[in-house]
Amino acid sequence: MRPPVLDLADLAARIPDGALLAVAKEPNAPMALARELIRRGAKDLHLVTLPTAGVFADALIGGGCVKIVETSGVSLGEFGPAPFFAEAVKSGAVEIRDATCPAVYTGLQAGEKGIPFMPIRGIIGSDILANRPDWKVIDNPFEAGGDPIVLIPAIRPDVAVVHVSEADRFGNAWIGGRHELKTMAHAAHCTLVTAERIVDHDLREDEAKAANLITPIYVEALAEAPGGSWPLACPPDYALDPGAVRAYASAARQSARSGGGEEWLRLLTPGHAEAAE
Amino acid sequence: MSAETNPMGDVKREELLISVIDGLLDGARHVAVGALSPIPGAGALLAARRSGGRVTIIGSDLPAHRMDGGVELFDMAAQGRVDGFFLSGGQIDGQGNINLTGAGDYPRGDVRWSGAFGSAFLYFQVPRVILFREEHTRRVFVPKVDFISAPGASEPGVHRPGGARALVTGLCVMDFDRARARFTLRSVHPGVTVEEVRDNTGFDFDLPQSVPTTELPSAETLGVIRSEIAQTIANPYPEFAERVFGVVRKAA
């Protein structure tokens, strides 16, 4: 049984309102899918980011799609702060669950192993921990006494989403060297893949690629979406579009400040960015 | 300071800071450099060139900086395979606590920053963390951070091989004593006075008997920074390399 190849709107329809949605930091952010969710008016998403996020999360927040963000940081990197994220956290429109990068990985690793939690070093004494009642501290049971250690509960996203350069019609998605994308897919109940291209041959036949695939057992459905990460990068096909991200950052800043305007969304629509310049 | 008596000579501030960081990483076997850190990255490259260590710059496309996905850096750090790392903060206090999360009452404070990133983990694991923040003002160096993204010191019994070694700013270098959770001024940059540092620091710190001036890089070191290091740091920091060193960008 092969996962179906759908059009983008039908793929997005498989993300129900209120879903626990996992997405990895860029590159490979499924921006075309984000636009589809915003267009649909998706609501109450609980976003968990691996381990941080940028334009993808900021735009979904700007589009009013997000209720909870679980993240180690949301930033537009060299293009500045994430305007909708910062505003939504300050206003309380979005509930923030601050994490630290390896803790997100640890929760997903517990999720992929089907175990309830996994320990992690560090974090003790931080206000991150103080604000995460779902994280526990125990004494290392293998020591005679003391040695406190943090436990992170397993994260099992309802849906994980990713945009890749290449997928095949059997449902394999090639993720290059980003092995955390496999962890994300393994931990999630299902994964939705968008791809620059969906090829006819089985990617598992190529030994070099076979080691770096999300395999069909995890993939619920795929959609072909050329330019699906724009304005962010999708290596090796294209790099980030600095002009477009800068334009988004500026418009989003204005919109977040004034509480209105959809210029930022127009700027995120391929083919419309040029008209604004 | 007046232009005709510029104590920096032809040395740019960025070059001085790169040279300071180089000195602090003496003997480090492996230094990792996080996002948005061109000066720390250049300093780490310079130290590695001098002492034969490794550098991993997150975000660089160069083969030597490749890692096994996003998880490996943290696993390496937890095992003690990363000797040096850099952290910063929207606020940093006198106990070495850093705040990358936001100013005011959490979570709905006055300013929300991006978030803690890996700090709450790496600050515990990496033995030689250098706190780096160019802006040296009372806005940044506060008596007490509003939110502890990562603590400067830990209770006895908490597993903590890592912590801050020093603080490098646009005005000075301070050493951090982890046992006392307290900074001591190590040197002031050329043209900067101790009073200026004190006036711009919101926390109390210790002073040595006499405060030396931060040493300028030698002509030889400057030559290396401006050629080899400038070329390498252009990936992933082309804008920095162009602005500071005039490295011409390669066509895409």
Image: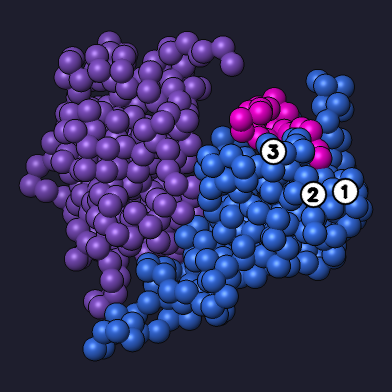
Chain colours: A blue, B purple
**How many neighbours does mark 3 have within 10 angstroms: few (below 14), some (14-19), or many (20 or more)?**
many
Residue behind mark 3: A166
Q: Residue B160, image x and y in percent?
A: 27, 67
Q: Residue A177, image x and y in percent?
A: 52, 43
Instruction: Please give the name of the residue rendered at 24% of the width and 89% of the height, measured from the top-left corner.
Output: A144
Say what secondary structure mark 3 lies in: strand
Chain letter behind tag 2:
A
Compare residues A9 and B200 and report the one nearer the observer: A9
Please determine if labels 3 and 2 lie on a single subunit: yes
Nearer the N terminus, badge 1 or badge 2?
1
Instruction: Give yes or no for contact between labels 1 and 2 (Cβ–Cβ under 8 Å).
Output: yes
- The span shown in magenta is A224-246
Compare residues A17 and A11 and report the one nearer the observer: A11
Residue behind mark 2: A222
Residue found farthest to the bottom: A144
Quadrant where the image shows the C terminus of chain B: top right
Q: Residue A224, image x and y in percent?
A: 81, 40
